[in-house]
Image (tube, coloured by chain):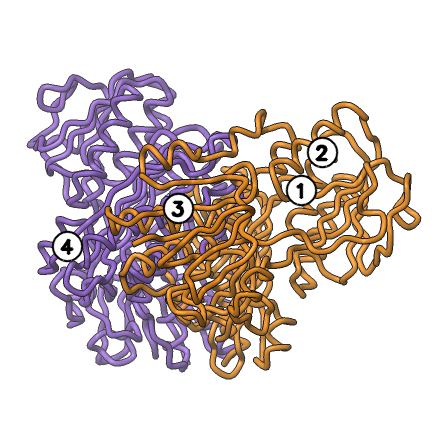
Chain colours: A purple, B orange
Amino acid sequence: MRLVVIGGVAAGLSAAARARRIDAELEILVLEQGRAISYGACGLPYYLEGRVKDLEELVVYTPEYFRNERRIEVRTGARVTAIAHARRELALEGERVRYDRLVVAAGARPAAGVPGADLPHVFRLHTLEDAARLKQYLDEKRPRRAAVVGAGYIGLEAADALRRNGLAVTILESSPWVLHRADAGLTAAVQKQMERYGVELRLQTRVDGIEPGRVGDVPCDLVILALGLHPNVELAAEAGIERGRTGAIRVDERMETNLPGVYAAGDCAEAHHLVLGRPAWIPLGTTANKMGRVAGANAAGRRERFSGIVGTSIARVFDLGIATTGLSVEQARQEGFAPVSARITAPARPRYFGGKPLTVELVADRNTGRLLGASITGEEGAAGRINVAATALHARMRAEDFEQLDLAYAPPFATVWDPLLVAAQQLVKLVH
Amino acid sequence: MRLVVIGGVAAGLSAAARARRIDAELEILVLEQGRAISYGACGLPYYLEGRVKDLEELVVYTPEYFRNERRIEVRTGARVTAIAHARRELALEGERVRYDRLVVAAGARPAAGVPGADLPHVFRLHTLEDAARLKQYLDEKRPRRAAVVGAGYIGLEAADALRRNGLAVTILESSPWVLHRADAGLTAAVQKQMERYGVELRLQTRVDGIEPGRVGDVPCDLVILALGLHPNVELAAEAGIERGRTGAIRVDERMETNLPGVYAAGDCAEAHHLVLGRPAWIPLGTTANKMGRVAGANAAGRRERFSGIVGTSIARVFDLGIATTGLSVEQARQEGFAPVSARITAPARPRYFGGKPLTVELVADRNTGRLLGASITGEEGAAGRINVAATALHARMRAEDFEQLDLAYAPPFATVWDPLLVAAQQLVKLVH
């Protein structure tokens, strides 16, 4: 019995490792088209910043580790050109590989660029190679003015890293929002933080092309393209694997595609969104790993399910933690909910512990009281608290239940009324 | 219509303030027997430490604030000697006060001491006055060796504060556990931390009396008695207010006692424990405030309920956050569950962000998979994560649901597999 996994980063390796743990006999082969496997792409901005000294630090496991410690064969530079499912066969350049079970974890790639994207001063920040090239450019050319196109996580984190290195930075974002989230409060918080640190953030600014020395009217000698991702679905689609409405591969709760024995996981696939109640495509390493584990378990003969996501994420922008989960008010409205929201700012800890202000916005449905989402920004305490909200979303908690959560208190850590509960008290008034 | 509240610290003032917000016409009187109201007793160890410079910093509101801003009359030094419920009357020294609704928020007091507790070098750390007296003693007498009797939160935090001020400290605890929790792992973690900072922690060491210059065989010129609390129920009991099995005042989910129109809240009352499924007495400021709010709302004519607690708490011991929620393995066993537990240690953040190790223990019931409790210790990230576990306990989440929580990840905040999820993965194996 042979399991083949296409993709050797988060989902693919999680699937392979899990399958091995379940079935010691299974033959497992991972095919990765890139040169490195098992790396944390989320660490790339910190390499740019200078905190990560060597890209090797971002590589968690090597192919040798998997071969020797897990008896999982990993081949890098192995590009699959076709899936012939009727014959249970993959085509690679110059060879064919047979499989019994297949996990497609082909990941995502940066969205198509704009005219001029191939100019030598234009970079993306998706792979280790991207980061190495960019770092070399920074060291050798010493650019002074950067334009970052796109205000998603990568764009914001790249802007932060470049600014810390002394560059003048302008971010250009086509939508009225940052972080791909229709959220006025969050956008304002990021805008303010950017201003404070001397980064210009221009919203609703479409970039139609890049010229040498300028993007639109922004002069620059470095451009970072951070226009978001596109799921790698072409190979799967050609093999008859169906895509969902999001454009990513459709899977059931076992991560199985419409082809029996073929699973998909990670950034190329959809996941069930527990607040939306339908599949969504939110490519993140955390979700990729969880989906990969479930895909690997099922491919190895178990019956496991992935319950779904609630859309949690966090980024640091100049020491400000910016965390979200579930839906913003605007998103909730678009989804047909009747959203109400409460937004408060309160210290994360008592004054005598130097508590920094934390802004919490909670969103609920007016009719049912159900909590729908949260955003939390602050220089301390944002991560832990967004996870409380995320857990409440998993549990379909109502605002009035959330308000009474038994959260931990001691002065070094929190205030006696946690900001989450203060926000919830406001929210409950709007629900009744 | 007149609402009288006995007690002006956490629960009492929360009740009064909530009642005022609901009913602008209600006459509200708060009777506090001490000299100060609305103070954060949890801050006292940090006054001892020197971080809080003035005890006034711990006072959140003054009687004048309540009088002028909330139209709530607050009397300090007002000791109620009897409740005559048939006449809806309270007896104070030299006068009688009529009520229509009554909230008993009489708090708790330090448990009875031991012979020698009245010696001049023996202190408690319960009120502002206690802290002021102790601070004066430290400044004037410059004691060099302290014995702390009791290893609950106050004992551990006091030991920390004294050690930071250069004293030699020995903690004497009669039980085999710290923090009133039958939890071997947690006790070992605290023991280790105490050793690291040069504090001797002696478990299973009963103190039968204090002599000048020594406690048992421990020489000392300062003794802190931190033997836990006792609910102030005598006044209520004499008035026919029933107590529960814990000895604290029994209330229903509306915080009403057996006497109609008489509510109880805070450290004098029981709260429903959602994991135990029965009332418990765990005196904490967070719970007191929540109970007070509900009592105040119902006393003002609303119908609200307090859903209950899960037993969450946290303390800092020499920079180590020590957090617990729900039940330990040993407690779960005593309660008739079939507990299994998983304990892991993993960095709270990636190495390049200097992530400190975090130890997570999760407890579940083997038969149902239900999560029963958690303990988390670490120099960073303990508070946020214990709150995730607490939220899961509120929602009666199972280990396999917990394992798939969509928690936030970015390198400045967490690892891609959060330590909570790593522990949950281990736990799930033991449940199936």
Residue A136 location (% of width, % of height): 37, 26
Residue located beneath label 2 in the image: B134
Few, some or many C-alpha atoms within 10 Å of disc 4 (few <14, some 14-19, many ≥20)?
many
What residue sits right under mark 3 in the picture? B29
- Name the residue nearer the viewer: B292 or B379: B292
Sequence-wise, the earlier of marks 2 and 3 is: 3
Q: Of the residues shown, which amino acid type is indicated by label 2?
A: Leu
Picture disc at residue B125: 1
Of all chains, the one bearing label 4 is A
Q: Marks 4 and 2, Cα distance to the nearest angstrom?
A: 52 Å
Residues beneath discs 4 and 2 located on the same chain: no
Q: From the top left corner, tell me how far across and down residue A344 is, in percent.
A: 28, 40
Marker disc for residue A339: 4
Neighbourhood count class around disc 2 (C-alpha, 10 Å): few under 14, some 14–19, many 20 upward? many
Query: In what element is the residue under mark 4?
Result: strand
Task: Judge depth for marks 1 and 3 and give the one in front.
Answer: 3
* Label number found at residue A122: none
Work out how far the residue at label 1 is from the one at label 3, CA to CA, in angstroms: 28 Å
- Tell me if label 2 and label 3 are in contact, CB under 8 Å: no
**Picture residue at 34% right of the left edge, 65% below the top:** B305
Q: Nearer the viewer, mark 4 or mark 1?
A: 1
Judge left or right: residue A150 versus residue B200: left
Q: Is residue A205 above or below residue B259?
A: above
Which mark's residue is nearer the viewer, 4 or 2? Answer: 2
Q: Residues within 10 Å of mark 1 (few under 14, many from 20)?
A: many
Q: Tell me the quarter of the picture where residue B208 sits.
A: bottom right
Of the numbered discs 1 and 3, the one sitting upstream in the chain is: 3
Going by the numbered disc 1, the residue's amino acid type is Leu
Q: Earlier in the sequence, mark 2 or mark 1?
A: 1
**Quadrant of residue A245 in the image?**
bottom left
